Image (cartoon, rainbow, N blue to C red):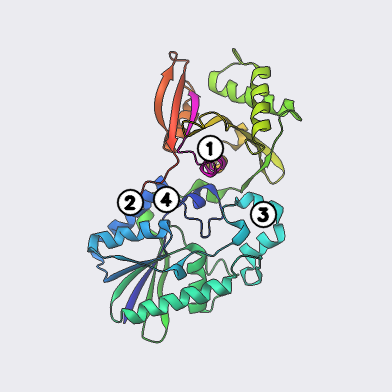
Amino acid sequence: MTEIYLIRHAQAEGNRYRILQGHWDGDVTAAGEKQIKLLAARFCGVPVDAVYASDLYRARHTAAAVARREGLPIRSDRRLREINVGPWETQFFGNVCHDEPERARQFIHEPDLFYLPGAETFAEVGERACAALEEIACENEGKRVAVVSHGVTIRCILSRITGVSLRDVEALPICRNTAVTHLLWDGERFAVDYYNDVSHLAPLPEPAWSRNGNVRHESFDPACEPAFYTDCYADAWRSAHGNLEGFSAEVYLNSACRHYRTDRESVLRMLVEDEPIGLVDMDTRRGALAGYGWLSLLYLRPEYRHQGYGIQVLGRVYRRYQKLGRRSLRLNVAVSNTDARTFYEREGFAVLGREGGTDGLLLLEKSLRRKRHD
């Protein structure tokens, strides 16, 4: 009997920011690193003979948690990759669901009917991934093997093994990050011992975004709707400083208009369905020569704060500056703005400097480059 531990990769940028990542080779998040440590601890008493993974970084880095302890190489196989979603790759879920609602509905609820030019079908994913898994089982007869793959790919594998329809999300939910599924191979077919086991993640909280809707964005011209922009900035200023002393609507509006004229993707209005919930303003010229991006404003209406929406908004800023080739992201935050400081520090921003006294500003920075571990 051959044992296969089929593992979903740790949380990656696409999972956290609600991006359709597919074959995009994004980074593992700080939360993902914690998951990997707990996964490694889970396998301390479970020796394995071989380790395989999708060739994407998030899968290989997760596989290293098992391989490193055993001193084993990671054998990469492209057939274990996530579904290729073609033109949707690196698009945000909220925008895809708004722009192509019927195809998005099929992708989520009727995957057997999903078709998008340039993308794989779920049947194609299942065929390639199952072929890879059977080869792995045959090459390691009587051994114990860890295989790290991706959420949709694992669902496709298990649907073919069990006969459960991909439409049945209750019987066959998508695995959580680093979830373990135990398969047994008798030389002819697989049997499922257990599925989507995340008992090792008990010390960690459930991701907040899983309980909320998807944020979408649209390019926003501040000159066309000056009141919306100034109202957002004024509320952000009030939240940071407790009053509007020192706030200049005209100065900030004129700056935003310059940012928009320079780059139509630099000022974005955020929405949940059709409800405006906030705003992002980026000065894409600032820091260009030095290699950093600048965030002038990130604003959420009070009723949408502390619910997991902020990270989806910040994800837009990360992706914009990653596409522009910037090495890091910088911003100012008021010393007295405890909520904002906590949010940015949790996201890995570090203090570079400070201006003024107790009511002054902190200069924060976060690297946008991947920290290679393998």
Task: Give the residue at x 32% y 72%.
Answer: 145
Furthest toward the front, the residue is 289
Span colored in magenta: 314-333
Q: Nearer the viewer, residue 253 or 306?
A: 253
Per the rendering, the mark at residue 306 is: 1
Mark-to-mark CA distance, 3 and 4 = 25 Å
The residue that disc 3 covers is 97
Query: Contact (CB < 8 A) between labels 3 and 1?
Result: no
Mark 3 vs mark 2: which is more N-terminal? 3
Task: Give the residue at x 58% y 56%.
Answer: 89
Per the rendering, the mark at residue 373 is: 2
Mark 3 vs mark 4: which is more N-terminal? 4
Mark-to-mark CA distance, 3 and 2 = 34 Å
Q: Nearer the viewer, residue 74 or 39?
A: 74
Mark 2 vs mark 1: which is more N-terminal? 1
Q: Amino acid at mark 1?
A: His
Q: Quadrant of residue 40?
A: bottom left
Mark-to-mark CA distance, 4 and 1 = 23 Å
